[in-house]
Image (tube, rainbow, N blue to C red):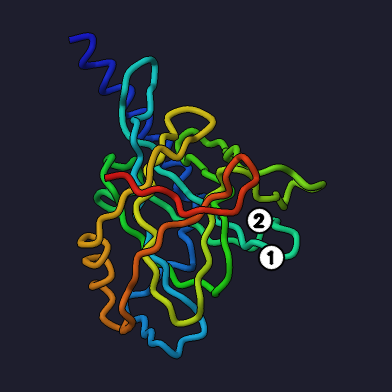
Amino acid sequence: MGNVMNRRAAWLAIMLIAIVVSGCAARDPNKVAADTQFTKGARDSILVLGVKSTEPETVLGIKAGYVPLVLVWGRVDPATKAASQSNVFKINTTQTLLGIEGGGTGETTYHVLRIPPGTYALSQIHTIVAGYNIIIGHHTKIGTSTHMTLAGGAPFFSIKPGEVRYLGDLHVDASKAPAKLVRLARNDQPAKAELARYPGIQVRPFFQAPSVLPESGEPATAMPVSQ
């Protein structure tokens, strides 16, 4: 009986925190609208990405639910290799139940965004419930807190005008700091099913994994896809 009560208390704590902070976590304006029209002649781009939390949050030593995440992708300056922390787009995995925003389910969620063409790097993972920002350990500061240089292990990608690109599914362990990218998976069918919700997108999607810079300083390579 005591364990049951503790689990309920832990889950309630997570939900209450999520409800409080959800009002401050604005949805990303880059999310594609239901009536979006997109053709090959478009000046911007469509990105599809799956995100999965791999480990539940622990409260009072009890596993109580999966934390909602915000993945921040910063625009990369080709000249300096700096990833901006202000010129960004975000992916928010917060789930909604009966009109209330709260924790995730531990399942992969798919996100379709309309973004300007260019090169972007994953520079920050923000956990809504825990309330802390995590600068993932793939960047080094270059004099200010608003820009970071790409370093070994940093995932990044480039996208052109008129493209619809599926990056794959990023699996993230954010149960404790610092957050870790566990693996990249590829699941074309659910990604295409999510795209099908937007009939105005009339460009055929293609899959291409993000790239990473090896720790050794060698040229960038494609991020491996787990089977």
Q: Answer whether labels 2 and 1 touch (C-beta < 8 Å).
A: no
Looking at the picture, tell me which residue is in the foreground, 214 or 168.
214
Q: Is residue 24 above or below residue 53?
A: below
Does residue 94 appear in the picture of this structure? Answer: no
Instruction: State the residue at coordinates (38%, 84%).
Output: 38
Give the distance between the C-alpha atoms of the residues marked 2 and 1, in whole angstroms: 9 Å
Q: Position of residue 88 (x, y in %)?
A: 59, 61
SS under mark 2: strand
Residue 74: image location, x then y, percent:
60, 58
Residue 140 visible in the shown view: yes
Residue farthest to the bottom?
A: 41
* Residue located at (45% from left, 41% from top): 20
Residue lying furthest right: 143
List the single residue furthest toward the left.
1
Circle 1: element type: loop
Is 188 placed above or below 109 here? below
Q: Residue flagged by tag 2: what amino acid is it?
A: Ala
Residue underneath mark 2:
83
Q: Nearer the viewer, residue 134 or 98?
A: 134
Q: Nearer the viewer, residue 28 or 137?
A: 137
Residue that mark 1 sits on: 78
Left or right: where does residue 160 sit relative to residue 137?
left
The spot of residue 71 in percent (x, y) is 49, 50
Q: Is residue 209 left or right of residue 198?
A: right
| Quadrant assignment for the C terminus | top left
Q: Can you give x and y, in whole percent of width and height, for residue 212 in the image?
A: 53, 50
Indicate the quadrant containing the N terminus: top left, top right, bottom left or bottom right: top left
**Residue type at numbered disc 1:** Pro
